[in-house]
């Protein structure tokens, strides 16, 4: 699935940025033939990835859970390393498959009470992989996460695939939390304008650099600068020029550079803007 050699290290950024959405627990395990176990949050390879990112100018990350186990992993890493904040949630594709959705939501709620769990995420709707029969439970899970985020005063990180209208409709119906992040933004310019009208952050991943992603570049062009974030969604979707390599937080560097060039921004000022935006969305790391 990925090239065996590591991706070339990028030149450090002139001002640090944050990877607003990553899965460090999967970076060195996903897609490998021998399927090694997930490393412990304090494992040397995890620390090495954080050090590598910091050297590239990606000084902070948001580690995201997608089920109860990975949410606990994210919370443990955030508690152990000041460069990390955690997000905890049930992925929308998993919600219809759980034997006891309410019990799992209760565990996510308990994790959301922890001070370094900064967000409920990634939750949301995915109509690409979940058929009509599972969408009711998916929506129930999403609405529960919205409620927890508001009760706990945390950001809400949304996975939205082929479900733009329903994501906005449910947020409008239930009332969105104060801080909402559309992770791996997948909409076009019109959808970006709707998100901006509601004050939602839009986080762009490596796929904004892909040849077939003009709609994402158009969305980035109309998104207010103060609502733009960058992310890896590692280990997936490494950006050009390292597409095909295993993605990891240091490679956020390339996406930040690409957007600065595409939007005709001074790189240092753009990175400073991204840093401020990420703290506005998730709070301060220190």
Image: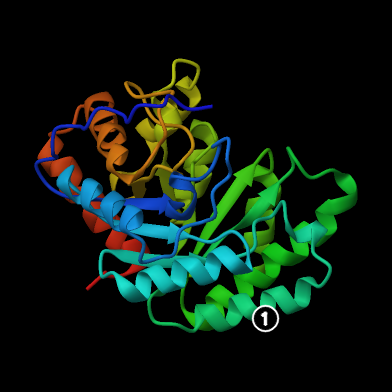
Considering the image in quadrants, where does the N terminus appear? top right
Question: Which residue is at 20% across, 32% downward?
Answer: 10
Residue 175 visible in the snapshot: no
So how many labels did they put on this image?
1
Where does the image place residue 124, in percent across and percent down from the top left? 64, 55
- Please state the horizontal and vertical placement of residue 136, each as a whole percent of the image: 84, 58
| Nearer to the camera, 89 or 165 | 89
Residue placed furthest toward the front: 34
> Between residues 144 and 244, which one lies in front from this camera angle?
244
Question: Would you say residue 161 is visible in this rendering?
Answer: yes
Helix, strand or loop at disc 1?
helix
Q: Quadrant of residue 162?
A: top right
Colour convention: rainbow
Other residues around mark 1 within 10 Å, as few (<14) / some (14–19) / many (≥20): some
Across and down, in percent, residue 97 comes to 81, 58
For the point 49% across and 84% down, the residue is 113
**Can you identify the residue that label 1 sits on?**
106
Above or below, 60 against 286 in this view is: above
Left or right: 192 with respect to 18?
A: right
Instruction: Name the quarter where the C terminus is drawn.
Output: bottom left
Given residues 152 and 247, the one toward you in this image is 247
Residue 172 is situated, as x and y percent measured from the top left of the image, at: 63, 61
Residue under the point 42% across and 38% down: 205
Location of residue 22 with respect to 145 vertically, above or below:
above
Name the foreground residue: 7 vs 35: 35
Left or right: where does residue 262 sit relative to residue 219?
left
């Amino acid at each position: 699935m990925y090239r065996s050699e590591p991706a070339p290290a990028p030149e450090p950024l002139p001002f640090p940025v944050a990877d607003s959405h990553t899965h460090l627990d999967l970076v060195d395990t996903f897609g490998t033939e021998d399927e090694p176990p997930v490393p412990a949050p304090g494992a040397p390879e995890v620390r090495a990835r954080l050090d590598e990112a910091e050297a590239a100018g990606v000084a902070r990350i948001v580690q995201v859970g997608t089920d109860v186990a990975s949410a606990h992993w994210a919370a443990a890493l955030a508690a152990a390393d000041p460069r990390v904040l955690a997000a905890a949630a049930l992925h929308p594709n998993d919600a219809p498959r759980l034997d006891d959705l309410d019990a799992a939501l209760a565990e996510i709620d308990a994790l959301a009470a922890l001070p370094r769990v900064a967000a409920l995420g990634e939750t949301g709707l995915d109509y690409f992989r979940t058929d009509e029969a599972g969408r009711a439970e998916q929506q129930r899970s999403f609405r529960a996460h919205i409620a927890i985020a508001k009760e706990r005063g945390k950001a809400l990180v949304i996975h939205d695939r082929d479900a733009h209208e329903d994501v906005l409709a449910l947020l409008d119906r239930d009332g969105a939390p104060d801080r909402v992040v559309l992770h791996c933004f997948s909409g076009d310019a019109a959808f970006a304008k709707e998100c901006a009208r509601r004050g939602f952050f839009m986080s762009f991943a490596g796929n904004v650099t892909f040849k077939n992603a003009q709609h994402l570049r158009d969305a980035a062009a109309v998104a207010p600068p103060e609502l733009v974030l960058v992310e890896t969604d590692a280990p997936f979707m490494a950006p050009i020029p390292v597409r095909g390599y295993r993605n990891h937080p240091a490679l956020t560097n390339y996406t930040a550079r690409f957007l600065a060039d595409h939007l005709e921004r001074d790189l240092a000022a753009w990175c400073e803007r991204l840093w401020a935006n990420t703290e506005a969305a998730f709070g301060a790391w220190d």
